[in-house]
Amino acid sequence: MSSYLVGLSAAVLGNVVIGTGQCMQKYGLNRLQREWDTRRAFQMEGSSNSAAAYPGAANPASSNHSLSSSMYSSAVDIRSRSSSTAAASQQPLLHLGASSKRAVGPRPRYTSKAWCLGLLMNYAGEVFGNSLALSYLSASVVAPLGIIAVIVNLILAERFLGERITANQRFGFMVIMGGVGCILLVAPRKSAAENAMQFVDAVANSGVLGLFGIVYIVQAALITAIRKGHQSLFAYVLVASLFGTLNVMASKMLTMFVRLRLAFGGIANPADIAFYGATGAAEAKPLVFAFTGPQILAAACLALSIVGQESFRQQALGRYPVMEFQPVFFATFNVVATLAGLLLFRELDGWAHAAVFFSVFFAGIALIVYGSRFLQRARSVELPSHIRLQKDNLLGHTKMM
């Protein structure tokens, strides 16, 4: 089997595992939400019973006026998520006899075994699938194959979580897959492992440290802007995409080192070459076990990028719907990771190949963005659970009248 097929198989299997893990995470979050809905239902039922037991106790003559005021307040709460949450936190929670506890929201996601298992599956797919594939293939091939994880997640969510796929969503995904197919059609297929010295030379002369430094400076500026309140979907997407790009670059260098060391014992670590140069890398001494300073630095960069990407991705998913965030993130990540990989590892064969590649590549990205619009347009609009409960409570008051 050729190195291209090996890398392609690793990327496909890795993304299947990632998509399954994402579905597991969604299942865990759904269970936490249902648990929270049940607790809130008990709370709202307890509040209704208390109001029914003492109707107009303070002023019987004004009971109808109080009921109308209560309905008006509930209607205001339906339109104001923050006010409804604050009012709910002041009411006693009637659940399993724990009336002294306060309703503060669903339990943290890390308390769900299903969510934790899904997270482990995500990173297992990244490490043993995509990272291995990057040692055989260009990032411009591996990054677009992430659409497989999205499709697997969608199919499993429809089959096991009861989510409905609309006609617009199906069309949107077909358009996105067409864009991914365009990118894969012109992506460079040559394997750096087949020409070890060319890969080592590319890393040594690509200015990898300068590129990483520029990315970290941009990251720091974006994160500072987000912390100061300048929050937007694109800001979160760009930060997560840049962290993902650092992850891809560090993973490719470390996995390539492992493969090159197994195949060619006399070749130095590409991370050492980028830091010390070709001559100094041969004389680099290990600091911890068999790892030199640049190797430890590359591993630290990999760990930091994983934590950063996951942190800002989760923050974005907490603020924006999945169907709104994921396609935009997918397109942005593909652009940034592909351009960084081509710049860093020189994987294009001359100006003619570069012109054809970038023409088709950006046409594919345009198709991905166009398909994403159908996903965003088709996403169902559903009231948050606490607002649904407030609405149900308001309808209950109306029936009592």
Image (cartoon, rainbow, N blue to C red):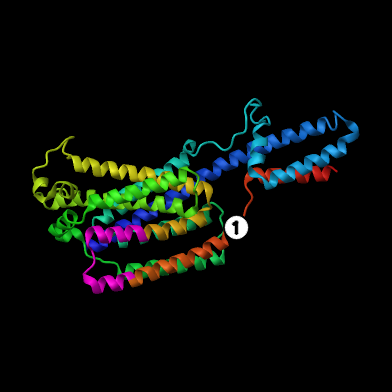
Magenta span of residues: 335-358
With 369 as the anchor, is 45 left or right in this view?
A: right
* Label 1: how many Cα within 10 Å (few below 14, some 14–19, many 20+): few
Quadrant in the picture for the C terminus: top right
Question: Hey, what amino acid is under mark 1?
Answer: Ser
Residue under label 1, please give it.
380
The image quadrant that residue 393 belongs to is: top right
Q: Secondary structure at mark 1?
A: loop
Residue 137 seen in render? no
Q: Percent x, y for residue 30?
A: 55, 45
Q: Percent x, y for residue 175?
A: 46, 69
The one of 108 and 74 positioned closer to us in this rendering:
74
State the residue at coordinates (83%, 30%).
Answer: 54
State the residue at coordinates (77%, 46%).
Answer: 395
Q: Percent x, y for residue 50?
A: 77, 31
The one of 279 and 102 positioned closer to us in this rendering:
279
Q: Per the image, is 76 magenta?
A: no
Quadrant in the picture for the N terminus: bottom left
Q: Residue pushed farthest right?
A: 61
